[in-house]
């Protein structure tokens, strides 16, 4: 005997449509399923994978620009090696905007070494210190006492460098940090050139090499000591161009230098 479903196909179809309308989307088995008897991997939702902990990056060692400058400067056995060390030094941002590294001019064996402040526009273009208008004034000043940066005799020659080898933008004063990181190089420069006498030309040079704040108009002409050598602060030639009346003090300092050279002979 046929069942009621078999007897009325249309009734079964209507009942299925009614279940679909109620939201049923899947057919079920004839027999019930005991979900407690299912394997764990099916009964429990899969655990979310645990993200691996990020691997900590090793800390970058902090670089001390001054300590690195000291190490590089002291490792230089001669002036050529010092020039190369300064060219390889990467911590002074002035290097990025400069055309040339201004290292020196004159005779390395000269008895008198002049340490200026920093290159200007002309010095940056040429690659030598004191070649602009202030440099021409410097040449006239020392020519008045018989000295010249090109003289073959070390007793009459001059050797010239700067505290900073790169031009600061717009010829601004070098910052305290810039002076500190370049000071080891200029000290080593003095040791290698081994002059009898130092001239600290301008406030920046005197303050850097004496390691204190110098009022150049008050302390010019007063003999100091740098690396065991007599050192005299002088007014910068650029200052003399702006203040011609100060040439009297500059002339007195030049005569003092001349007398010191005679004493040291």
Image (cartoon, helix red, strand yellow):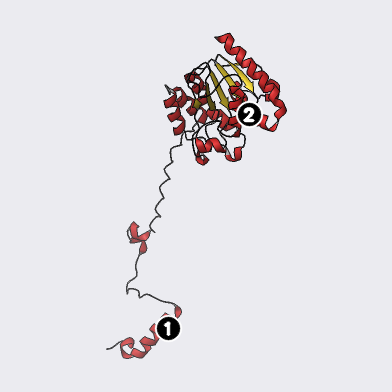
Looking at the image, residue 236 lies above or below residue 49: above
Alpha-carbon distance for marks 1 and 2? 106 Å
Disc 2 element = helix
- Please state which of residues 106 and 11 is positioned toward the viewer in this rendering: 106
Q: Secondary structure at mark 1?
A: helix
Relative vertical location of residue 210 with respect to residue 243 in this rendering, above or below:
above
For the N terminus, the image quarter is: bottom left
Q: Earlier in the sequence, mark 1 or mark 2?
A: 1
Residue 264 percent coordinates (x, y)? 56, 10
Q: Position of residue 153 (x, y in %)?
A: 49, 17
- Left or right for 76, reference 98: left
Q: Are marks 1 and 2 in contact (CB under 8 Å)?
A: no
Q: Which residue is mark 2?
A: 237
Q: Residues within 10 Å of mark 1 (few under 14, many from 20)?
A: few
Question: Does residue 125 appear to the left or right of 51 in the view shown?
Answer: right
Q: Position of residue 51 (x, y in %)?
A: 41, 50
Q: Which mark is residue 64?
A: none
Q: Residue furthest right?
A: 245
42 to 1, vertically: above or below? above
Counting labels gives 2
The residue at 55%/37% (across/down) is: 122
Which quadrant would residue 175 be assigned to in this image? Answer: top right
Disc 1 versus disc 2: nearer the observer: 2
In which quadrant is the C terminus drawn? top right
The answer to whether residue 180 of the structure is visible from this angle is yes
Which image quarter: residue 12?
A: bottom left
Q: Nearer the viewer, residue 70 or 4?
A: 70
Decide which of 195, 250 is in the foreground and name it. 250
Image mark for residue 18: 1
């Amino acid at each position: 005997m046929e069942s009621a479903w078999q007897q009325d196909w249309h009734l079964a179809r209507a009942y299925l449509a009614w279940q679909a309308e109620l939201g049923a989307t899947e057919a079920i088995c004839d027999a019930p399923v005991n979900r407690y008897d299912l394997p764990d991997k099916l009964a429990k939702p899969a655990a979310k994978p645990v993200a691996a902990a990020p691997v900590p990056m090793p800390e970058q060692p902090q670089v001390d620009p001054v300590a690195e400058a000291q190490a590089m400067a002291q490792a230089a056995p001669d002036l050529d090696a010092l020039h190369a060390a300064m060219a390889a030094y990467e911590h002074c941002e002035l290097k990025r905007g400069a055309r040339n590294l201004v290292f020196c001019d004159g005779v390395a064996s000269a008895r008198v070494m002049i340490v200026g402040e920093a290159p200007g526009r002309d010095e940056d273009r040429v690659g030598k210190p004191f070649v602009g208008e202030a440099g021409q004034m410097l040449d006239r000043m020392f020519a008045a006492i018989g000295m010249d940066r090109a003289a073959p005799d070390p007793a009459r020659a001059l050797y010239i460098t700067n505290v900073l080898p790169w031009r600061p933008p717009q010829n601004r004063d070098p910052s305290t940090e810039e002076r500190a990181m370049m000071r080891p190089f200029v000290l080593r420069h003095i040791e290698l050139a081994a002059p009898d006498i130092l001239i600290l030309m301008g406030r920046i040079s005197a303050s850097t090499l004496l390691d204190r704040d110098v009022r150049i108009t008050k302390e010019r002409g007063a003999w100091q000591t740098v690396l065991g050598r007599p050192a005299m602060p002088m007014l910068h030639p650029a200052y003399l161009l702006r203040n011609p009346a100060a040439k009297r003090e500059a002339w007195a300092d030049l005569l003092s230098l001349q007398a010191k050279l005679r004493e040291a002979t």
